[in-house]
Image (spheres, rainbow, N blue to C red):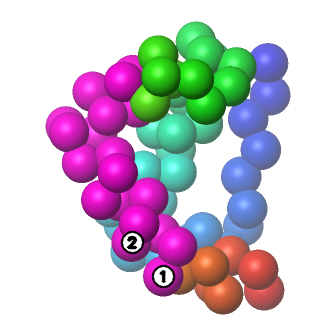
Amino acid sequence: MNISLNINMIFLPRHLQDYLLLHELAHVRHKNHSPAFCAELDRLCGGAARAMACELKQHSMVLSR
């Protein structure tokens, strides 16, 4: 399995960089965004996955450069 990352993520705050990495690593176990994937990601993020996903949306212009 390959994990692809957007180079522009270096412009994000560190905790959102970590979130993106954890998101992609959760896909190693769960190939989709199923409830099991969401639970795994939330566990990896210490219960803050939803909040970080919302915060990441505020930085969408950074990732679309």
Viewed as shown, does residue 36 lie left or right of 29? left
* Residue at the image position 39 percent from the left and 71 percent from the top: 55
According to the picture, the residue beneath numbered tag 2 turns out to be: 55
Picture layout, residue 2 above or below residue 60: above
Q: Quadrant of the N terminus?
A: top right
According to the picture, the residue beneath numbered tag 1 turns out to be: 58
Q: Residues within 10 Å of mark 1 (few under 14, many from 20)?
A: few
Q: Are marks 2 and 1 in contact (CB under 8 Å)?
A: yes
> Real-space Cα distance between discs 2 and 1?
5 Å
Picture layout, residue 61 above or below residue 17: below
Viewed as shown, does residue 64 lie left or right of 21? right
Residue 31 in which image quadrant? top right
* Residue at the image position 61 percent from the left and 31 percent from the top: 33
- Magenta-colored span: 39-58
Residue 37 placement (x, y as % from top left): 50, 23
- Classify mark 2: helix, strand or loop: helix
* Residue at the image position 34 percent from the left and 46 percent from the top: 49
Q: Is residue 10 magenta?
A: no
Residue 27 placement (x, y as % from top left): 62, 25
Residue 48 placement (x, y as % from top left): 24, 48
* Residue at the image position 20 percent from the left and 39 percent from the top: 47
